[in-house]
Every structure is written in structure tokens, then in C-alpha cells.
Image (tube, rainbow, N blue to C red):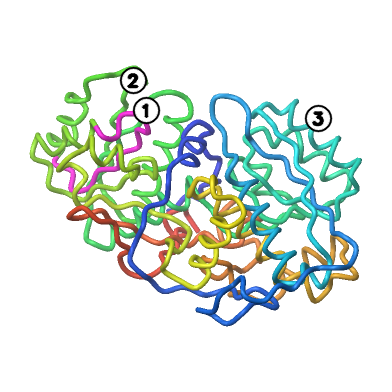
Amino acid sequence: MKRKVLVTYGVAVAAVALLTACSNSSPSSSSSATPSGSAAAGADPFATPNKATKSPIVVGLVNLEAGPITAPGYRTAAEAAASYVNDYLGGVGGHPIKIESCVTDGQPATSQRCANQLLDKKPVFILGGADVGGAGAYPAWTRANLAVVGAVPLTPVEQTYKNGVIFSAISGPDNAAAVSYASQKGGKSASVVYTSDAAGTHSGELFQQFFKNTGYTTVKAVPVAPTAADLSAQAAQVVTAKSDTVAVNTPVGCGSMLKTLDQLGFKGTKVVIDPCADPKVIAAAGAGAEGMIWGGPFDPPGASADSTLMAAVIKKYQPATAPITASYMGFQAVMNAQKYLSPISDKLTTESIVGAFQAGSNNANFAAHPFTCDGKQIPGAPSICNGYQHIFQYSKGATTTVGDWVNPAPAMGG
């Protein structure tokens, strides 16, 4: 019997994944979420200015930008999207978007202080950010009865917020989708290599459950100490177990593990987490990176009209923004808000905002798979409206997408 898995992401693992660049890829299928009032696909997006001239729509944003791990790209990409919307798309029904942001450091107390400061700005809704300390901010959003549009769903507070709508997901669905893809290739026995700290152990347990939910009959846990420099013993366990699939869930030691597996003759399917796709990690892995697969929620740059537009807008307004998944999520949230809230721009309430996204199904989602906000897309995470992932594969020096979008829900117990 399949067990439903609540996506309670390991904080350290998820945050590291946020800092990893999405890899370039060949074009793939997508559902383009053409913004309201935008130019035709392929046209110069900056050819015809269309300034928003009505009263501004204030939105609040708490984002992780201080401390050892940060994701400033969510805010800067969202700001780039807002500038484009305000300058070229006529804003949200004529109203410019004004983002009021507050920087947090991952501590709930800091996020709570940010939330209270932002409430003084009278936001119409909250633009969900990347914040592992969200448990401090969300009680404030609840008290004020505010909708949260978008977010990087790192913790249960984002995933289960009553008035939240999240358009893409990582650090759980991406790994589940990659496991689902591996199972379709006939995999039956797996080893899960994971860092044995609290976050890594939790993430490793999720990986093991994903394999079991997709029909793997043998799943071996292979813990790695956080300080381990030599991973040969763990790699040898994978080879000795004769696993046909390995999941490498070691953000710090990924390159070393892949390289050692190759040296020991492992020939099976290699499922990796997003940090393993970093070019520096691929270089360290050498031949061990060949054929590895992982999941990602966005069309890569150049693969669709949306992703092409996003790259151009970020380059124009916020060129220092890192091309990472968190950045794309910030941009996506603003573009979806512009598209779906423009028709109701003069009567924005929490109920009308949430209702605009909950209406219909398979709704166009900027640079990503269509979304359906029915609370059923990801087991245990009703705020997430779409968990579908592309499968990326590194082979012969290039990264490409393979197949169509993959639904991670079955691997997660849905």
C-alpha cells in the first residue's frame, strides 16, 4: 500500500538546491502563459511601451537574503517582472505593481518582524518568497487574511496555507519525478546515498519512499557523514548491492560520489538532486556525470516563448540575477499575477484573488506546466497547484530534456 508523503523539505538540502543554476537545454513542450496585453510570440517585447497609470497595487515580499544561505534572485527577478509589467503590459489592469520587500535571515523571529513591518504598508496580497523561516511570517498573513501568490515551498507553512497558490515546486517533486522516470525504464533495485545530518536523512527517507511507491522491490540506504572526504566505501556498497539505480542525494559530495561510482564500474541509472547539475560538480565528476538525470519545474532558457521573454526581461532590468530555480519562481509569480488578476484589478480581495487562480483547470502557467489549484496536485501540500517536472539528462557534454512533463504525484503516494 502506498504511503502519502507530505513534502516537508529538508531545509539545508532545499536551500542548497535554490542556489544551483538551472542548466541550458534543448527545446521541449510547454504551455505558454502569454501575459495579458503582451506582444505576439517572437516579437520584440520592448518595442511598444504601455505604462500603467492607475493607483499602485502594493504587494509584500519576505525573502531570504541574509545568513549563510540566501536566494536574492527571487526578489530581483520578481522586481524585473514587475518593471516589465508596469512599463510594457499596462500593469495589472492599468495598476502598477509596487513590491514592498523585507530581507530575512531564515530565522522565524526575523520573518515575523518582516511580516509585521510589511502589514503597515497595507499590501493587497503577499508575493510568496523563498524563506525557510516562514513559520514566523505566515501567522501574520493569516491574521490579516491575505492571499499569498507564488513562493518557493520549502516548509509546510507555505504548502498548506489556506489562501496560498504556488505555481511550481522543487526539492521533493523534482526528485520524485526523476525516480518515476527511472522506474519507467525498468528499474527494480535502488541505493539511496544521502548525507546523514538531520536534513539529509529526512530527504534520503523521502527518496527511499519514492522508490518504493514506484515499484522498486529493493531499496538500500547508504548514509554518508557530512564531513566525509572519501566516499569510496559508500560507492562500494552501491556496487556490491548490484543496484540498477542509484540516487545521489549528497549536495556537498555529489561530484566525488559520481566519480567514484564510475571508477568502481557502476553502469546503472543515476538519479541526482539539482545541485549535482552545477557545472563545477559535473567537471569534478568527470565521466561519472555521464547519463545522470534530475527533475526541474521550468522550461529552460530558449525552450519556449515564456522562457525567452523571461531571460530578456531579467537581462534588461536585473542583469545580476542568478539564473536559478528560485529566480524563475519569483518571475513566474508576478507574470501569473498580471495575467489572472488583470480582469479583476478594480475589485481585488483575498477571496477574488484566490478564486481567480482556483477557477478552471490546466491553466496556462508562465514557463512551466499548466496549473490546477484544486488542492490535490501534491499529496499533503494543498497550496501547490503544479508539481510537474521536466527530466533533464547530462550526456556527452550537454544537458537536454528527455520525454514530456512527468507527474511526481504517484511517486509521492498520490
Q: Earlier in the sequence, mark 1 or mark 2?
A: 1
What amino acid is found at the position of numbered circle 1 in the picture?
Thr
Question: Going 24% across and 47% down the picture, which residue do you hit?
Answer: 270
Q: Position of residue 147 (x, y in %)?
A: 79, 55
Contact? badges 3 and 2 (CB < 8 Å):
no
Disc marking residue 195: 1
Whole-Å distance between the Cαs marked 1 and 2? 6 Å
For residue 376: magenta?
no
Contact? badges 1 and 2 (CB < 8 Å):
yes
Dot 3 crowding, Cα within 10 Å, few <14, some 14–19, many 20+: some
Circle 1: element type: strand
Residue range corresponding to the magenta coloring: 242-255
What amino acid is found at the position of numbered circle 2 in the picture?
Ala
Q: Which one is closest to the eye, mark 3 or mark 2?
A: 3
Q: Position of residue 392 (x, y in %)?
A: 33, 57
Q: Which residue is mark 3?
A: 113
Q: Earlier in the sequence, mark 3 or mark 2?
A: 3
Q: Position of residue 386 (x, y in %)?
A: 56, 62
Q: Is residue 129 left or right of residue 141?
A: left
Whole-Å distance between the Cαs marked 3 and 2? 36 Å
What amino acid is found at the position of numbered circle 3 in the picture?
Arg
Circle 3: element type: helix
Disc marking residue 225: 2
